[in-house]
Image (cartoon, rainbow, N blue to C red):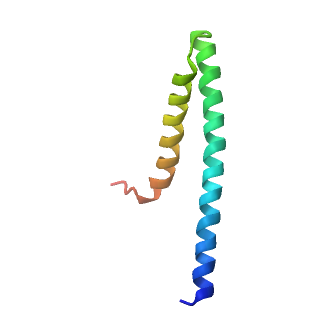
Amino acid sequence: MGLKESLESTLFAIIASALLIIVTIVYFGITLWVVKVGSEMFFGPGLETNYAVLAAALLSASGVLGGALKENVIIA
């Protein structure tokens, strides 16, 4: 493996990581909006911001990790 291939693979990994971070931030924002709207629809305007962010963070993290680990799971 030459220097050119090493630089290409490193650049590809950096770009892929940056895109994953951007997509995750967008996904978190959408999930936060869904949690806020859903809680206001069902429970009224009483949800604290801290709990909304916590719920959105848990849902986003589980979604991203579930998608990343999906290929490694073997269903018997």
Q: How many discs mark residues in the rendered view?
A: 0
User: Who's the residue at 61% across and 79% down the image?
Assistant: 7
**From this viewpoint, which residue is outermost toward the left?**
76
State the image coordinates of residue 71 (x, y, percent, origin top left): 46, 58
Q: Classify residue 75 by image quadrant.
A: bottom left
State the image coordinates of residue 50 (x, y, percent, origin top left): 53, 24
State the image coordinates of residue 19 (x, y, percent, origin top left): 65, 56
Q: Please, is residue 72 above or below residue 57 in the view?
A: below
Q: Please, is residue 70 above or below residue 36 in the view?
A: below
Instruction: Give the quarter of the figure containing the C terminus.
Output: bottom left
Q: Please, is residue 13 above or below residue 24 in the view?
A: below
Q: Give 20 or 38, whichever is nearer the viewer.
A: 20
Q: Please, is residue 74 above or below residue 7 in the view?
A: above
State the image coordinates of residue 20 (x, y, percent, origin top left): 61, 54
Q: Give 42 or 10, whichever is nearer the viewer.
A: 10
User: Who's the residue at 59% across and 60% down the image?
Assistant: 17
Q: Classify residue 48 by image quadrant.
A: top right
**From this viewpoint, which residue is outermost toward the bottom?**
2
User: Who's the residue at 58% across and 73% down the image?
Assistant: 10
Tell whether 22 sits left or right of 53. Answer: right
